[in-house]
Image: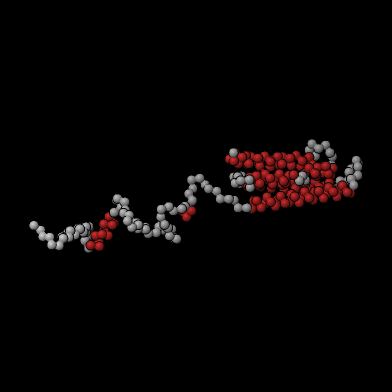
Amino acid sequence: MRQETDRLREPAAWALVGFLALRLAVDALRVLFGVGSGVDGFRARAYGGQSTLLDALAPVLLAAAVLLVTHAGRPTPRARAITRTALGVLAVQGIVGLTAALGALAYDGGGFAHIPAGARVEQSALNVGVLVLFALCAYFLIVVLGAPSPPTVTRGRSLPPQEWPSYGRDTTAAGQPAATHPAPTGQYPATGTHTAATAAGDAGSTGEAGVVPPRPTAPPPARAPGRTEA
C-alpha cells in the first residue's frame, strides 16, 4: 500500500501545478488582453479580475504540491523540477496579480456607478495580504531548492571500503589486517593447516634444512624394588 501511494505522489503534484498554471494562463489572457471577457478597457477588466489573480488559495496549493514530493516521504526523482515549475507559476501569477491590482486602483467605476473610497481601501488591504502570502510561499520554495539533495544509492555501484564491516578479522587504523591471534590452549588447528612455512620454521630451530626432528619417546616403566628379573 505504501509503495502504491508513493508512486502517485509525483503525478498528483504535476497535476496540481499544471492545473494552477492553466488557470493562470486563462485569467491572465482575459484580464490583460480581454480574451473571452467582453469588457472594454484594461482598468475595468483589472478591477473585476484582481480577486481571481490574487487568490490566496494558489500559493497554498503550490506549496502543498511541493511538500507532497519533498516531505511526504523520500523525495521523488523529479522533486526539484516540480519545485522550479511551482516557483515559476507563483512568480508569474504574483506579477500579473500586482499589475491587475494597480490597474484596478485607477478604475473609477465608469458610467455605471461610483466606487466608494472604503471599498478601494478594503480591496487594497486584501491584495497586500495575498501578496505577502505569495512572498512567504516563494521564500519557502527557494529554501527547498537550496536544500542539499539526499544521497542516493546507484545500482551496481559498490560502497567505499571503509563502509563495509569486517567479519572474522581485526583491522588496524591503516586498514591493514592485524596479526592472527593464536588458537586458545587445548585446541588444535584443523587438518591441513600445517603448511610448508611451519615445517621450515621447525627445521630452522633444529639447524637442519627440511628435516623434522623426531618425537620424544616415553621413558621405560620403573621397576619395583626388591624384584629381580628371572
Locate the N terminus by quadrant.
top right
Residue at image position (77%, 48%) is 130
Locate the C terminus by quadrant.
bottom left
- The mark total stands at 0
Residue at image position (47%, 52%) is 164
Q: Give coordinates of residue 59: x percent, y percent.
A: 72, 46
Nearer to us in this view, 186 or 13: 186
Q: Quadrant of residue 58?
A: top right
Is there any visible trace of residue 123 in the rendered image? yes
State the residue lying farthest toward the front.
226
Q: Is residue 45 left or right of residue 17?
A: right
State the residue lying farthest toward the left.
230
Is there any visible trace of residue 211 in the rendered image? no
Nearer to us in this view, 222 or 5: 222
Q: Is residue 133 left or right of residue 78?
A: right
Q: How is the image coloured?
A: secondary structure
Q: Is residue 186 left or right of residue 6?
A: left
Q: Give coordinates of residue 17: x percent, y percent.
A: 68, 42
Q: Give coordinates of residue 5: x percent, y percent.
A: 61, 40
Residue at image position (85%, 48%) is 122
Q: Give coordinates of residue 163: x percent, y percent.
A: 48, 53
Nearer to us in this view, 82 or 207: 207
Residue at image position (71%, 41%) is 20
Q: Is residue 162 above or below residue 46?
A: below
